[in-house]
Amino acid sequence: MKKVIFLSLAIFCLSQISFAQQKRVLTLDEVIELAKANSQSAQLAETRRNLDYWSYRVFKAGLKPQLLLRGTVPSYTNRADAITQNDGTVAFRNVNQNNSQLSLGLQQVLPWTNTTVSFESNVSRFDNYLEGSETTRFQGDPVGITISQPLFAVNPFKWDRKIEPLNYEQSKRAYVQDIEDASRRAASLFFQLLIEQKNLEIAEQNRSANDTINKIQQGRYNIGTTTEDEVLNAELNLITAQSNAAQAKLNVQSNTLDLRNFIGLTDDVEIELVPPADAPEFQVDYEEALRYAKENREEYLDFKVRRLEAQRGIADARAARFSATLNASYGYVSAQTAQLSGVYDGSNLAGGSRVSLNFFLPILDGGRNKARMNQARERLNLTEFNIQQEQVTFEQTIATAVRNFDQILSQIQISLKRQEIAQRGFEVTNGRYLAGKVGILDLNNARDTKDSAIRNYIDALRQYWDAYYQLRTLTLYDFKEGKLLYNPLLEYDPKSDSMVERIQEK
């Protein structure tokens, strides 16, 4: 029997230890770090950052030369084809032959002029497999240069060289903003759960206190020192407290699930939050906040990009009136030969050139060009109007955030002092109630005031940290630490799959 009791106690102790290990205590900073590392918002921000990085790499690669191997190997035909005769008639002849072409060349686009320059070496082979006429012939251009120059057209590289670096810089700033948004969301969920945990703590205390009060009221009623309506009121308060405690527990479970899902906490653990010890006091100047926002926020780069794209639209409309392309090539051409080596035999080579000018010029366009130009100008005007409105709205948002932060900062100390006074007032009223000097209504009022003060202080902390992270997101600057959150030298490194600081060019 003793062994059974000992075993039962051991199992009980181990279960308690296991239960204790499943509780995880988290601070606000720890929750935010988990959100930055694991949340879906952070992972989505990283995916967008990587996509924008490779988009920029595509643009940069387009400015570099290409070594191209092109060809058709083979192009075989074995059938009856219509062959045009010398007198213009058509005769169907059996054809059994192969044509192959191969070209190796270096191609480079000159972005300043939108000129395409190519150096190529071409070789062609013809095989006739028709019985009685078997032949093999080679012909090629051992070396040649080709230049293609669009005339009067918009140079896309000129605009891309202005827009693409801005897009890339904008994407880096957007990544930091997305991470700050995730931090703000994590802080919001942290305080939602913290408030519900505090509500549960208050509800459990009230349930226990009302249970004690109910017993006291029953005892007083039995000795005739209280009335029946006060006993009924105590019973009603106990039932209400029990219901509130049950609802508070459900609220804690729901908000715990929300926080766990957001920060990517997969372990089945109970979360216990530690409220921030204080609310650091620091001043935020509106002009300074606006300056940091203009220097760091991706929106202000987006304004530049949208203006450039609207201006590019005008250039596109103007260039659409007519177009022309000048193509020129020069090189050495070989005559046909029965041996491949003959293609590269100097005695078999001769200089050859080709020049062409292709153009498109509408004589009567029915007003298309005028309509396109007016459309592009109005689109530029609309872009400027929208940008101005968005700038005003954004500046108002920053001004509101600064005023809101200053107001919340002044309310923190008031809420803390009110909580201390309400707590002390409840203790005094509770003592007087136990001494029989005040009734249950006075005690309930004191408890409600104390509970409300506790909730108000936690809510003031929530507002403070929400405003703090809002300012960080709006300006990409940490006024508490006095440091920038955005480092223009940080870039994504695909080898390490992380952000690394590049060496600043002198």
Image (cartoon, helix red, strand yellow):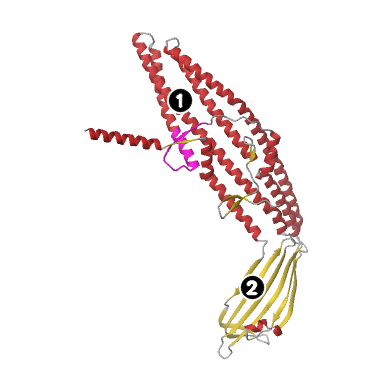
Q: Nearer the viewer, residue 451 or 13?
A: 13
Q: Position of residue 482 (x, y in %)?
A: 64, 37
The numbered mark at residue 462 is: none
Span of residues in magenta: 252-275
Work out whether 396 lies above or below 490. above
Q: Position of residue 235 (x, y in %)?
A: 38, 18
**Which residue is label 1 attached to?**
202
The quadrant in which residue 90 appears is bottom right
Q: Position of residue 473 (x, y in %)?
A: 61, 39
Type of amino acid under label 1: Ile
**Residue under the point 63% across and 69% down:** 68
**Which residue is label 2 attached to?**
104
Position of 377 compared to 342: left or right?
Answer: right
Q: Secondary structure at mark 2?
A: strand
**Residue under the point 75% across and 56% down:** 315
Q: Position of residue 174 (x, y in %)?
A: 62, 46
Is residue 259 found inside the magenta-colored segment of the image? yes
Work out whether 41 lies above or below 138. above
Work out whether 171 lies above or below 64. above
**Number of numbered callouts drawn:** 2
Q: Earlier in the sequence, mark 1 or mark 2?
A: 2
Pointer 1 local density, CA inside 10 Å: few below 14, some 14–19, many at least 20: many
Quadrant (top left, top right, bottom left, bottom right) of the N terminus = top left
